[in-house]
Image: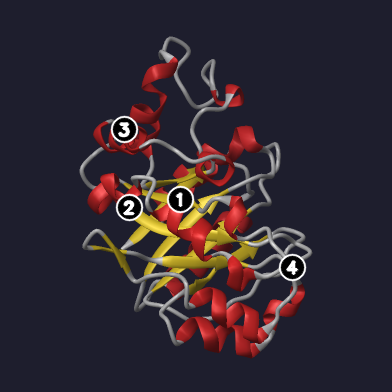
Amino acid sequence: MIRIGIGGWNFPEWRGGVFYPADLPQRRELEYASSKLGSIEINATYYRTQKPETFEKWHDETPDDFVFSLKAIRFSTNRRVLAEAGKSIGKFLDSGLTRLGRKLGPINWQFAETKSFDPQDFGDFLALLPPEKDGLPLRHAIEPRHPSFADPRAADLCRARNIALIRSGDSKFPDIDADTADFAYLRIMGTKDIEQGYDQQGLDHWAAEVRRMAQDRDLYLYVISGEKHRNPACAMALIERLT
């Protein structure tokens, strides 16, 4: 299974015919985006706790085979001692996200770029991430933003718990390409102000990487940052290459 999408859907830069048709009401933007893409990574969950009814609404506005990835609440990861995040993790997982049902994809636990790798603390944090919630299997992914996480021990700790290490492509963050779970999670951040965000060589490169990484596992790819108004076109160009 390959899922390709974007981060969020509520951006003024995508209106007026850039991605959303000029006459599309804002209340239908999620419906439209989910008809063109395979997945969306939700950023709002990083900044504040959502209501169960919100997750239900997102579920009901998208196709049956659509999948969301969620960025975990920042209070769980932006801390000096990761092992002390248990209460915050529990609150996040209790917020109603399982109302997404089978549309719940991976949870992205994004670390601050100043957070360096501490084997003991990192391992203790991973132990706090449960494999299921309300009977629904959970997929966890770690987005390290410090080069010290290139340490093979970080990959080993994730591999022991079937937790993915997120690749950060074309960015200032480390691109750690490690097979640690039965799925892969890739975020590419190098779109430019050209029609499809990347030139043909760049699109071919990432399409080839997706094929390689997805040979024996599921894969989620999100086009993030860069020239944001070009990200939907980039995601759709990659979908076209891979179908």
Q: Secondary structure at mark 1?
A: strand
**In whole angstroms, how far apart are the C-alphas of marks 2 and 3?**
15 Å
Q: CA distance from mark 1 to mark 3?
A: 16 Å
- Mark 4 or mark 2, which has the lower sequence index? 2
Residue type at numbered disc 2: Leu
Amino acid on which disc 3 is placed: Glu
Q: Which mark is residue 192?
A: none
Say what amino acid the circle numbered 1 marks: Leu
Give me the disc on residue 104.
2
- Residue 221 rendering spot, x and y as whole percentages: 48, 57
Residue that label 3 marks: 53
The nearer-to-camera label among 2 and 3 is 3
The one nearer the camera, 237 or 11, is 11
Q: Earlier in the sequence, mark 2 or mark 3?
A: 3
Residue at x 20%, y 43% (from the top left corner)? 64
Q: Residue at x 34, y 71 (%)?
A: 131
How many angstroms separate mark 2 from mark 1 (CA)? 8 Å
**Residue at which label 4 appears:** 115
